[in-house]
Amino acid sequence: MLTPALYGFSVCLGLIIAIGAQNAFILTQGIRNNKPLLIALICILCDSLLIGIGVAGLGSILVSRPDFIRWATWGGALFLILYGFRALQSSIRGGASLEIQREEVTIKTPSLILATLGVTFLNPHTYMDTIVLMGGLSAPYAGTERFGFWLGAVCASTLWFFSLTLGARFMAPWFKKASAWRILDAGVCLIMWGIAAALVQQARTL
């Protein structure tokens, strides 16, 4: 039987590696070298907070408020639609090279922080994975075991986000051609709109 820490690590890693808005955002900004370590740190802190809320037993608050979930779902879908539209524009516009992209697409730190918080907190799936699901799985544990579950999950989050940031740096040489940027931005657009479509469908059933 897995220890609480290893169980929390395994579950969190399995949830977090799925392709989604947050991972696509981190990968894109990492390739563009837009303060990737800051973005990774923000995502780790957000995950730690949300998982902590779930492990503390507060996930039932969101589950018991269907109106909150419904409006959060619509809001998340709208945000992802707009972000996907921006990625589509970037794909159509294109660019010359990696060096030029870094100069033209560099985002100011406050805007970058807000965008990172947006892809994290405006996605209802984030709450379902961290607060509701992780919180529910930690229910059988108590005391130090529950803390171990949370710590294992945080370690998985830390490992993944820093690995994704490092991986983006290794991918950077592939993006010296404008065509690579067009493909990446088009892919980001499809991911964002695909998730948004799923959220809209979910919101209509709530």
Image (cartoon, rainbow, N blue to C red):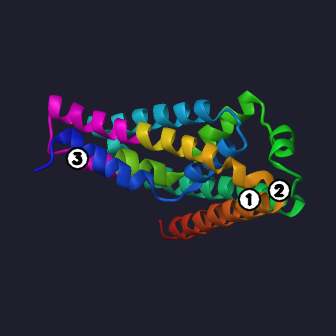
- Mark 3: few/some/many CA within 10 Å (<14, 14-19, 20+): some
Q: Residue at coordinates 45% horizontally, 54% vertically from top-left?
A: 17
Q: Foreground: 182 or 71? A: 182
Q: Which mark is residue 134?
A: none
Residue 40 or 124: which is nearer the viewer?
Answer: 40
Left or right of 130: which side holds 176? right
Please give left or right for residue 14 compared with residue 46 in the image.
Answer: left
| Label 2 packing within 10 angstroms: few (<14), some (14-19), many (20+) | some
> Is 173 one of the magenta-colored residues?
no
Q: Amino acid at mark 1?
A: Asp
Whichever of callouts 3 and 1 sits on the residue coming sooner in the sequence is 3
**Residue 201, horizontal then vertical, whole percent:** 55, 71
Q: Which residues are magenta?
A: 133-157
Q: Are marks 2 and 1 in contact (CB under 8 Å)?
A: yes
* Residue 7: image tag: 3
Residues 192 and 132: in front is 192
Residue indicated by mark 2: 90
Which badge, 2 or 1, comes first in the chain's sequence?
A: 2
Residue at coordinates 56% horizontally, 53% vertically from top-left?
71
Amino acid type for the residue under numbered disc 3: Tyr
Mark 2 element type? helix
Residue 51 in the image: state x and y as whole percent: 36, 39
Q: From mark 3 to mark 1, how far is it between C-alphas?
A: 35 Å
Earlier residue among tags 2 and 3: 3
Residue 160 appears in the picture as rendered: yes
Report the predominant secondary structure element of the magenta stretch. Answer: helix
Amino acid at the residue labelled 2:
Ser
Instruction: Kindly indicate the quadrant of the structure image that contains residue 138.
Output: top left
- C-alpha distance separating marks 2 and 1: 6 Å
